[in-house]
């Protein structure tokens, strides 16, 4: 019994810390605006370059969105174009290929998010339990190295390993699990899985870093207290480590969900082929091939705007959800 | 995992900003700062859509610089990207010389390239002489009959070689006692028999037929052999009636369906490499280089690395012979078809170049006799000698040319022929000597020992002897459809892109599926093509062909 009591006290302590954080956000003095400005002069100056950077690189380019409402031709100036209203959006929404691209993007995005997060957390938890420091550091370094390998190379490794004469098939046939080799890359139903698996292999180590850092910040007293009460390693993981990093997990999830639709196209382009093309077409690839590649800048921009709108909606939904659960959130 | 900020929209917006800033900046940098009179060579930048990593410092390049005072800095699209030219236009940052292949229309529309008519008139003596009465074929379109590019294909071409036909390993011919192979049926029987005799080659499994359908090369190893087997001349994705100009998207034709039904059967019988649609180009070439692939359907230039590797490994019998294979006796192989000078693709001069005149003079020089001898033969005394007034390649050079795939890149010999203005392989210099080292006799001399032996067995001089001769096939009135400038964003372009994407997928699925499903898959594809209004693309392409024939005066 007493074990449980201690553990729950520990939980209260953590919860207390986070409410403290929240309170801090409310100003507890009532200075005038200018006075406040004067007091925070140094801070404001420090943030200025970043605000300028943000405006130049993130806000000004948004002006280019007008392209989506024109028949944009680069040889003319921005305002000498023909205005066409919603034409490009209408064309986009009437295009069956676009819906296929959307489905693939969301499908692979969600799979990547779920498995990417699960594996990263699990890996971080296991690494965190390693008491032998040198081994831990080595494992960590080795595991995040694939992150720095280009997708071009990873895709070639994957294609070679999964080919009918590749190592995976040799293994499966050799051990008698399969009678005939499977041509994995020629199976449209497996494509999402292959992309996700390749992604997990490449990024798990890297994604685990941030969770490991969060785990390093957990108060050791909590573990000591739990140990005194006889909590096993698994219990400590479940009741101390995981709850402690929950805010980090939630914030990262929200940010990642906002980026769900921005899964890029390198993986799909490099791993894909004509057999699986239907499952490999993602929005970015669609924008590249049918937008920029065909000189239809306006059409490409319309796709870009659509993506941004989806991202913002997703972020708002998740953030609202987190807010209602009383968890850490982005804004 | 999702922290990479590779958002497409962001990129487009950044590009937009660049365009915007570029449009605002003044053009003071492009005034005549005229330092052209100094002896320092000027550097011209060249975008080569077919280029590769290469510096302009081999002996031939140095000689070119010496003669013209021009150094080239060659840029190329990484990984054969389709987006290089559109991005170039978006940024407004053009190289001096642009070889854009099919993207030329976009550059013309964007005002990125200049008209060359006046320059040709004023100082294009070499170019005028080279093109002669074919000059009209350089013209852009009926609405804008100006000349924007020069180069790419040889003028006065003879046909001593084929490319893009079915090719079979020489050892198959030898083992089977040199059979006649003219139809797909005979072709299949030959490789089937050989595989039964030799299930393994050098300890590895024999691959009867391998294709490369995983990237754009689908078009040349899957799509084009289909029309070739049906006796349709090479017009890319189109089948065009040379008399009426009527164009049809070729996959709508019943002959092509029959070809793919055959391929589907090949796959079902285990004669088609199961990795044909998934392996990468490197894997494909390494399979070919190992000598265990009995047959391919590919362009010679696509497999030349494998060919050179086989020869240098002493596996001459594993190299390939081109075959005039068609679906049946009633179809005539178009392997030696003369398309005339096709125009279309070529090198253009950018509108922003500081050195437009110099660039044109350079191109004109490249069309001169002196330049053509240099780029084709190399340097006298180093790469070739003149014996009794004839140019003869040095023995060492001849050997390297046939077995070392870095020969052209290292010495520069033959490297600057394409895509520059070039005389054809049948052209003669002022002394009546061939301008190209690849005369028919040279091609024959350069066959490897196995090839020579097989030719003797068949009682032929050259592989082309078993193809229907060029004279019988006639000269095309419309050139080749894939060279036509298609305006960007037009219905024709968009429908064709969609149709190409669809057919690549559906046909691949049809080939790999069960023979029982073949008809259903094929018919569903035709329905889908009709749903995307392929008929409209057919009509527009017909229109385009008629216009080209009118522009060229061939109709």
Image (tube, helix red, strand yellow):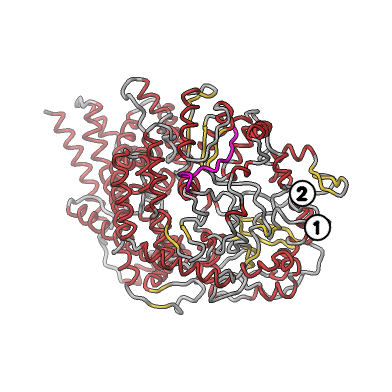
Q: Secondary structure at mark 1?
A: helix
Left or right: A105 in relation to B425:
left
Q: Are marks 1 and 2 in one subunit?
A: yes
Tell me which chain the residue with mark 1 is part of.
B
| Residue A149 visible at all | no
Query: Relative to the observer, which residue lies in front, A25 or A291?
Result: A291
Mark linked to residue B5: none
Decide: few, some or many residues near mark 2? Use Cα within 10 Å; few <14, some 14-19, many ≥20: many
Whichever of labels 1 and 2 marks the residue nearer the N terminus, that label is 1
Of all residues, the one furthest to the bottom in this rendering is A80
Q: Is residue B69 above or below residue B266?
A: below
Residue drawn at x 43%, y 39% as measured from the top left: B278
Query: Relative to the observer, which residue lies in front, B147 or B90?
Result: B147
> Which quarter of the figure has residue B259?
top left
Task: Look at the image and tell me in which quarter the C terminus of chain A lies.
Answer: bottom left
- Residue B116: image location, x then y, percent: 66, 72
Residue drawn at x 49%, y 71% as measured from the top left: A74
Of all residues, the one furthest to the right in this rendering is B388
Numbered label tally:
2
Q: Is residue B521 above or below residue B91?
A: above
Left or right: B354 in relation to B67:
left
- Residue B41: image location, x then y, percent: 77, 61
- Magenta span of residues: B319-330
| Residue B124 visible at all | yes
- Residue A75: image location, x then y, percent: 52, 73
Which residue has dot 1 on it? B66
Is the stretch drawn in magenta largely helix, strand or loop? Answer: loop
Q: Is residue A211 above or below residue B536?
A: above
> Which quarter of the figure has residue B111?
bottom right
Tell me which chain the residue with mark 2 is part of.
B
Left or right: B231 in relation to B526:
right
Which residue has dot 2 on it? B377
């Amino acid at each position: 019994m007493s074990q449980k009591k201690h553990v729950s006290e520990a939980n209260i302590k953590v919860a207390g810390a986070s409410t403290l954080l929240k309170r801090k956000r409310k100003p507890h003095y009532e200075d005038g605006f200018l006075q406040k400005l004067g007091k925070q002069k140094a801070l404001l100056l420090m943030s200025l370059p970043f605000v300028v950077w943000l405006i130049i690189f993130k806000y000004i380019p948004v002006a280019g969105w007008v392209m989506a409402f024109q028949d944009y031709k680069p040889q003319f100036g921005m305002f000498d174009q023909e205005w066409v209203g919603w034409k490009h959006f209408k064309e986009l929404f009437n295009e069956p290929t676009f819906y296929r691209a959307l489905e693939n993007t969301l499908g692979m995005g969600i799979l990547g998010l779920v498995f990417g997060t699960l594996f990263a957390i699990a890996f971080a938890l296991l690494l965190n339990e390693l008491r032998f420091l040198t081994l831990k550091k080595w494992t960590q370094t080795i595991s995040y190295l694939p992150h720095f390998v280009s997708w071009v190379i990873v895709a070639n490794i994957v294609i070679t390993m999964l080919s009918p004469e590749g190592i995976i098939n040799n293994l499966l046939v050799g051990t008698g699990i399969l009678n005939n080799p499977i041509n994995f890359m020629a199976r449209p139903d497996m494509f999402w899985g292959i992309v996700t698996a390749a992604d997990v292999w490449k990024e798990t180590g890297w994604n685990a870093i941030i969770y490991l850092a969060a785990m390093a910040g957990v108060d050791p007293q909590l573990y000591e207290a739990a140990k005194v009460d006889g909590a096993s390693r698994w219990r400590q993981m479940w009741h101390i480590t995981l709850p402690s990093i929950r805010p980090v997990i939630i914030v990262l999830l929200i940010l990642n969900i906002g980026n769900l639709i921005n899964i890029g196209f390198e993986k799909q382009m490099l791993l894909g082929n004509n057999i699986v093309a239907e499952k490999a077409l993602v929005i970015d690839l669609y924008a590249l091939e049918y937008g920029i590649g065909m000189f239809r800048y306006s059409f490409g921009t319309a796709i870009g705007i659509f993506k941004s709108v989806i991202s913002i909606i997703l972020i708002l939904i998740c953030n609202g959800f987190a807010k209602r659960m009383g968890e850490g959130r982005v804004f | 995992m999702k922290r990479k900020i590779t958002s497409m929209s962001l990129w487009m917006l950044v590009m937009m900003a660049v365009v915007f800033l570029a449009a605002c900046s003044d053009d003071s940098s492009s005034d005549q700062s005229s330092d052209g009179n100094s002896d320092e060579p000027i550097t011209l930048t060249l975008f080569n859509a077919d280029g590769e990593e290469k510096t302009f410092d081999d002996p031939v390049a140095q000689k070119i610089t010496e003669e013209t005072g021009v150094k080239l800095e060659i840029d190329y699209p990484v990984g054969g990207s389709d987006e290089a030219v559109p991005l170039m236009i978006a940024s407004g940052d053009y190289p001096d010389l642009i070889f854009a292949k099919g993207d030329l229309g976009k550059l013309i529309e964007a005002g990125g390239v200049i008209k060359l008519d006046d320059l040709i008139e004023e100082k294009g003596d070499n170019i005028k002489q080279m093109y002669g009465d074919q000059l009209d074929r350089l013209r852009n379109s009926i609405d804008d009959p100006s000349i924007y590019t020069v180069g790419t294909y040889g003028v006065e071409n003879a046909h001593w070689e084929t490319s893009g036909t079915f090719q079979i390993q020489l050892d198959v011919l030898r083992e089977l006692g040199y059979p006649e192979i003219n139809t797909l049926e005979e072709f299949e029987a030959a490789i089937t028999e050989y595989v039964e005799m030799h299930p393994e080659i050098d300890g590895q499994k024999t691959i009867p037929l391998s294709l490369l359908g995983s990237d754009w090369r689908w078009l040349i190893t899957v799509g084009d052999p289909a029309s070739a087997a049906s006796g349709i001349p090479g017009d890319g994705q189109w089948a065009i009636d040379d008399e009426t100009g009527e164009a049809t998207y070729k996959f709508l034709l019943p002959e092509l369906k029959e070809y793919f039904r055959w391929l589907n059967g090949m796959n079902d019988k285990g004669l088609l490499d199961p990795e044909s649609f998934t392996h990468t180009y490197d894997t494909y070439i390494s399979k070919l280089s190992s000598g265990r692939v009995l047959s391919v359907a590919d362009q010679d230039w696509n497999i030349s690395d494998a060919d050179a590797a086989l020869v240098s490994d002493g596996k001459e019998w594993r190299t390939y012979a081109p075959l005039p294979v068609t679906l049946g006796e009633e179809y005539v192989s178009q392997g030696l078809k003369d398309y005339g000078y096709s125009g279309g693709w070529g090198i253009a001069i950018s509108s922003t170049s500081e050195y437009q005149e110099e660039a044109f003079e350079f191109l004109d020089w490249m069309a001169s006799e002196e330049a053509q001898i240099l780029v084709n033969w190399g340097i006298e005394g180093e790469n070739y000698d003149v014996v009794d007034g004839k140019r003869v390649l040095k023995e060492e050079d001849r050997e390297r040319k046939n077995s070392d795939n870095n020969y052209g890149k290292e010495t520069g010999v033959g490297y600057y022929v394409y895509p520059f203005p070039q005389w054809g392989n049948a052209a003669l210099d002022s002394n009546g000597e061939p301008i190209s080292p690849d005369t028919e006799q040279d091609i024959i001399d350069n066959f490897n020992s196995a090839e020579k032996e097989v030719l003797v067995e068949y009682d032929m001089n050259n592989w082309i002897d078993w193809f229907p001769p060029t004279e019988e096939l006639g000269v095309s009135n419309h050139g080749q459809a894939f060279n036509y400038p298609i305006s960007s964003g037009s219905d024709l372009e968009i429908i064709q892109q969609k149709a190409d994407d669809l057919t690549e997928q559906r046909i691949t699925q049809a080939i790999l599926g069960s023979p029982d499903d073949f008809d259903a898959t094929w018919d569903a594809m035709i329905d889908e093509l009709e749903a995307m209004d392929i008929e409209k693309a057919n009509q527009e392409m017909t229109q385009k062909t008629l216009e080209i024939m009118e522009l060229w005066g061939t109709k």
